[in-house]
Amino acid sequence: MAVKNRSIEIYDTTLRDGCQGEGVSFSVEDKLRIAHRLDQLGVAYIEGGWPGSNPRDVEFFARSRGERWERARLAAFGSTRRPRVSAAADTNLRALIDAGTPVVTLFGKSWDLHARRALEVSLLENLAMIGESVAWLKSQGVEVVYDAEHFFDGFLANPEYALASVRAAEQAGADRIVLCDTNGGTLTRPLVESIRAVRAAVRTPLGIHTHDDSGLGVANALAAVEEGCVHVQGTINGYGERCGNANLCTIIADLELKMGTRALPRGRVAELTEVSRYVSEMANLHHPDRAPFVGRSAFAHKGGIHVSAVLKHPRTYEHVEPETVGNERRVLVSDLSGQSNVIAKARRWGLPLDKNRPETRAILERVKELEHDGYQFEGAEASFEILVKDTLHQLEPFFKLEGFRVIVEKTGADEATRAEATIKVSVAGAFEHTAAEGHGPVNALDNALRKALEKFYPGVGDVRLTDYKVRVLNEKQATAARVRVLVESSDGRRTWGTVGVSDNIIEASWEALVDSLTYKLLKDGVQVQKLLRPAVLKHPAASNEVAPPKRRPARNRRARPSLPATRRTD
Amino acid sequence: MAVKNRSIEIYDTTLRDGCQGEGVSFSVEDKLRIAHRLDQLGVAYIEGGWPGSNPRDVEFFARSRGERWERARLAAFGSTRRPRVSAAADTNLRALIDAGTPVVTLFGKSWDLHARRALEVSLLENLAMIGESVAWLKSQGVEVVYDAEHFFDGFLANPEYALASVRAAEQAGADRIVLCDTNGGTLTRPLVESIRAVRAAVRTPLGIHTHDDSGLGVANALAAVEEGCVHVQGTINGYGERCGNANLCTIIADLELKMGTRALPRGRVAELTEVSRYVSEMANLHHPDRAPFVGRSAFAHKGGIHVSAVLKHPRTYEHVEPETVGNERRVLVSDLSGQSNVIAKARRWGLPLDKNRPETRAILERVKELEHDGYQFEGAEASFEILVKDTLHQLEPFFKLEGFRVIVEKTGADEATRAEATIKVSVAGAFEHTAAEGHGPVNALDNALRKALEKFYPGVGDVRLTDYKVRVLNEKQATAARVRVLVESSDGRRTWGTVGVSDNIIEASWEALVDSLTYKLLKDGVQVQKLLRPAVLKHPAASNEVAPPKRRPARNRRARPSLPATRRTD
């Protein structure tokens, strides 16, 4: 069947089926943020959760009702009515309507084994459960997507019954019938044959929902589209039960770039890499390096022959241009890539760079070194801006750390663990030495630092840390591993992100905290204090000299490369 | 085409193409060990390396000549002769023969773009390079596998030329012609059409070599087998350039368990999981949890509905039995799961629980409370077992914490951050007070704790932390947020996971560390030390009394619920 120029509906279930993946867990706040990102990407449907199964999903739908959605239609997921209860009296169906979404996705049993063994109902009662549930939901005015769970296994075991189950959904008015390979065990050939039988039996637009247990999640979804399915379900990064759901990042790229179908609004396919990384950050899971199209290694060339050929002519070893999906080429060992990426990034934040200036090369080199050390500037734009300004000599430190000490103490097995930080900073020769407690070493240090600085720069009192993430980089080193800390801060008007990396979590947090306060003062246009009123003098050793603070790199991560002294503003 | 009962040759290139994957690197010793493991598994061919490309591969072949191989035929890999040189005078071809393997795999260009742009030769010269190289190798008495690099891209661009290139190999006597989707960009439908054209043009047995750049590496290999290919190339765990090669673990399982073909000697498919993990250990890479068939999560069930159904009847949510590939079913304990998950897990450790016993309710209540507090027992089975045993009064603590103190200090902006921990523990009235440094507060505490305990329980010296993960739970609390720490430990024989949660990262880590050592001692059958030899006495205050340690809950997270005193073993 010709697929070119056809439109395919993308149905994302990261927030529901994706959460059944081992290690995947989102807060309500995470879910809302991901839903908005998916909406911007332009998927047609977002399945937000199963309101009958847990209170978190009920809260998600309650909060999502107040939100504006650009394009996506939200769906609540749930099962057919219980056996021997009327649809109107079923509390789970009621919960689906109460979720207040324009779409309800209902799953029912297509496999006789499941009806008999899992539900423990007769085959006829199962058909009634499907039909009555769909009909009642339609009577409530929602769009109904019917997920035929285990359709392919059911079709193999008892084709007549499997077809009867989807006919029951069609007759009751389902808007979409989605054929699910729930166990992920179906090979492509029998899957295609089953779809042909369904197309002969029903007229409702068909969808496909596949899993990767046989390594065929993507292949089966694409084959289904070739067989006429117009609706594809999957998850970002393929999160999901067992081996995961079909990976939408791969499917969307294949549909758009290879099959000529339309799956997203024009131009949005270039956001795939960023969306994929965003969701893995939210899940706090390693982004899969080898993921097709969006992985860090997806356009990384290592073999010598590959590298020399790809530099002559990229198409020799690249099936698509990395930029089309928002990814980038990387040449391993002798890294020749990345410059355009850094320039593009800097421009996005209003820092015009171009290839012909020596500063650009210097920035690029620092970024590469830092990325090699585990830094990552996605989600840490404030640190990136500080790095760029520092390299361009457009930044002077607002204070100098004289020292800190954090003590964490437990005085017996059943005693609480106490954390206390002491800190000494100086600003233009004036010292402040103070202390604070906290709910752990980082919180104590954060409290102490802000307490010390507030005296010189009252604005830091407005800063609240709104998010704190820790990622262990080389996990095999266990407790001696490097960690990356991402901090998100807000002053009530702006929100910004900063990053720190170290094998010591306190040091990494410190870097991110210092960047956060530096960025705040920078954006407020606060002047670095240089002159000192005598009243502020505290430290005897400093009281005789009023000198500007010694220059030091804003980030002590690495020495700043020496640069021609252009455009110094200080 | 009927494939049932056909034999398929498995050609493993983990040691050559696999090493072009980012982060994959093997020593000669590793390569020999992997080759032997693959030989035992029963693959038909093992591609050991490219002797022309690096000295390590030359050494591998030199050493492999002295080894005995059960079934596999070793292959050396290399390219066609250079332009304008006779095959007999080409040093790379000579190196292939010098490798001394029974098989040589030669790759040549099928795509006119590559001949012109990468090799920079005429199209005719490229055909001569293929034919003459194959012919010369055959004259040296080896089996020749011809890899038609970029065959599918070449066929799309210039079908006549692509077919001419494989005919040149056939006419020169190649034993196998392998069609390669080198860039991984080919969709299944055009791949199938190309193979049909080749089958009409040549009679040499065909092979397939695919990559995963479009997420179709496995699907394309299986489709090629259905089209008559008898030889499948790939790598263990799908290691390889960019997104990787087709994953042989998945392909072999699909071929054997689903398509009814024979790919390994009878019974060996059950070794797949172990081989997959073995190779990832050798590569020092995380084993991919979600890998089909062999991943840790491949048969892990999390959703409550899945779990209760799978316990009634495994086939409801499992496409094959985990044991057929040497894997195992896992039931995850999470907030999506219910009572049945907890009971199923406890049974696996010989702790028979059922719904009607009061202990079961007590355990469930503790699990729910702990999960509400942020604990997660996925990947922390050891902590769960300790929790269950503790609730059942089957556990006594091995030591008592008297106190610890961790100090993290930075004495100036450019100084390194130092971490030191002091700790005091007691075992049956004997005290040990010691200190250690580390790469951060947790590492220092870990070092100090093991140093203190090793004196009483030498076995703890064998424990190594192999993984350490930190997850911030309520990120909106930022640095005052609760954190969950997951620790993976190993003593060289077993591997186990433990968990801790607190708003203080040190306390959370402490919990996970204590559980880890407790589990080790429990599994070793070590007795809790109760009596003391006078020589061990250290602490003056304790020297007059030799009393058993005061009972305390093994986990001080929460008070243990009071229980009827049943089945106490202590």
Image: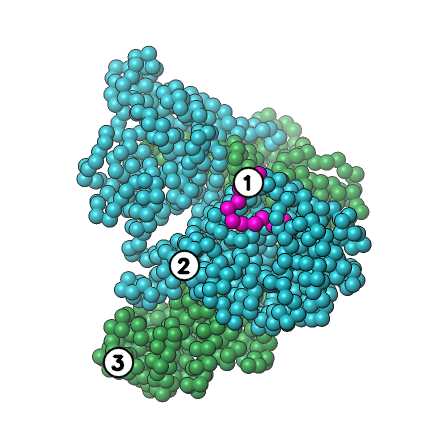
Chain colours: A cyan, B green
Q: Amino acid at mark 1?
A: Glu
Rendered view: A343 above or below B290:
above
Dominant secondary structure, magenta = loop
The answer to whether one can see residue B364 in this image is yes
Chain under callout 2: A
- Looking at the rendered structure, the secondary structure element under dot 2 is loop
- Residue that badge 3 annotates: B125
- Residue that badge 2 annotates: A298
Q: From the viewer's side, name the closer residue of A309 and B373.
A: A309
Disc 2 with disc 1 on a shared chain? yes
Alpha carbon distance from label 3 to label 1: 65 Å
Mark 3 or 1: in front is 1
In the rendered image, which quarter is residue A190 located in? bottom right
- Residue that badge 1 annotates: A67
Q: Residue at x 30, y 22 (%)?
A: A529
- Kindly give the residue lying farthest to the top in the view shown: A535
- Looking at the rendered structure, the secondary structure element under dot 1 is loop
Locate the C terminus of chain A and report the quarter of the image it occupies: top left
Q: Amino acid at mark 3?
A: Glu
Q: Residue at x 34, y 56 (%)?
A: A330
Alpha carbon distance from label 2 to label 1: 35 Å
- Say left or right for B127 vs B310: left
| Residue A544: image location, x then y, percent | 25, 15
Residue A346: in magenta span: no
- Looking at the rendered structure, the secondary structure element under dot 3 is helix
Rate crowding at label 2 as few (under 14), some (14 to 19) or many (20 or more) other CA atoms within 10 Å. Answer: many
- Say left or right for B262 vs B45: right
Rate crowding at label 1 as few (under 14), some (14 to 19) or many (20 or more) other CA atoms within 10 Å. Answer: few
Magenta stretch, residue numbers: A66-76
